Amino acid sequence: MRRIVVVDSGVDGGQPALRGRRVVIGPTFGPAGQREAGEREADVLGHGTAVAATIARFLPPDAPVEFVSLRVFERSPTCDFTAVVHALRHALALGPDVVNLSLGTTSLRHRRELADLAAAARARRVRLVAPASYGGLPCDPGALADVEAVVGDANVPWQTPELRPHAGRLIWFASPLAAPDADGVRRLRARGESLAVAAVSGCLLRSALG
C-alpha cells in the first residue's frame, strides 16, 4: 500500500474522483501544535479535496493507495505556518511516499525547521512537493533543496509534468489547470500552483506504484 499525505483544508472522500479510494481523515493542527482529532466538519473550503482529486486522476482506479488528510486551515486558505510545521512533522512519522503541500510561506521564520524536516524526508525517501514561489517571490518549503519544487506552466500538457534545470536546481513545471473533465465546482476551489503541485504529486505517486 502506497501512502500520500495531503496537508491542506481536509479531504472529502465523496468527491467523484476519490470514490472507492482509501481516505483517512487525520487530525487538524493548530498554531501551537495542538491536535484536534475525531470527526469534523467536511472540507468546507474544498481546496484540499480538489488537490486530492487531482492527484487521484493520475492513478489507476484500483491502485493500492491511501490518502491521509491533515488539516491546517478551514474556511480560508491561510493559517499560522507553525501549524504546517507541526503537520509536516506528523506526516513524516506516518511513513508516506509523498507529502503534498499546495501551500507555502514567503517568511523565513520557519526556514531552519523546514530545512531539517525536508532533509529528514529526503533521508527516508519521502517526496515533499510544494510550490517554488508565491506572488512572484520564493517561498518555503518549496525553495529548499530537498523539496520537489513546482512552477505552474500552462504550456505543459496536463498529466505530463516536466523536470527541468532552472536557477541552479531541478524544478518541476506542471499544468496549473484543472483536469479537462473536472466539474465546475472543483475548478473554483483550487487553481494555479495548487493544482500544479498536485499534478506533480500524482505523477510521483504513479511512478512509485511501478
Image (spheres, rainbow, N blue to C red):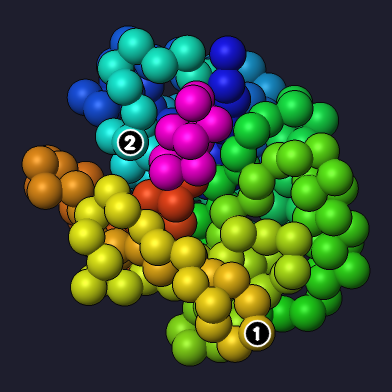
The three-letter code of the residue at mark 2 reads Phe
Image quadrant of residue 2? Answer: top right
Q: Earlier in the sequence, mark 1 or mark 2?
A: 2
Image quadrant of residue 124? Answer: top right
Classified by dominant secondary structure, the portion drawn in magenta counts as: helix
- Residue occupying image coordinates x 10% and y 41%: 181
Q: Label 2: state its secondary structure.
A: loop
Q: Marks 1 and 2, how far apart in space?
A: 29 Å
In the foreground, 191 or 60: 60
The three-letter code of the residue at mark 1 reads Gly
Q: Residues within 10 Å of mark 2 (few under 14, many from 20)?
A: many
Q: Residue 175: in sight, yes or no?
A: yes
- Residue occupying image coordinates x 28% and y 49%: 159
Residue 119 x %, y %: 85, 55
Q: Is residue 203 magenta?
A: yes
In the foreground, 53 or 65: 65
Of discs 1 and 2, which sits in the foreground? 1
Tell whether 111 sits left or right of 191.
right
* 208 over 8 or under it: above or below: above
Q: Residues within 10 Å of mark 1 (few under 14, many from 20)?
A: few
In the foreground, 204 or 13: 204
In the picture of the structure, the residue carrying the numbered disc 2 is: 58
Residue 88 x %, y %: 73, 45
Q: Residue 43: in sight, yes or no?
A: no
- Residue occupying image coordinates x 68% and y 60%: 147
* 74 over 111 or under it: above or below: above
Q: Label 1: state its secondary structure.
A: loop
In the picture of the structure, the residue carrying the numbered disc 1 is: 168
**Magenta part of the protein: which range?**
202-210
Give the quadrant of the N terminus. top right
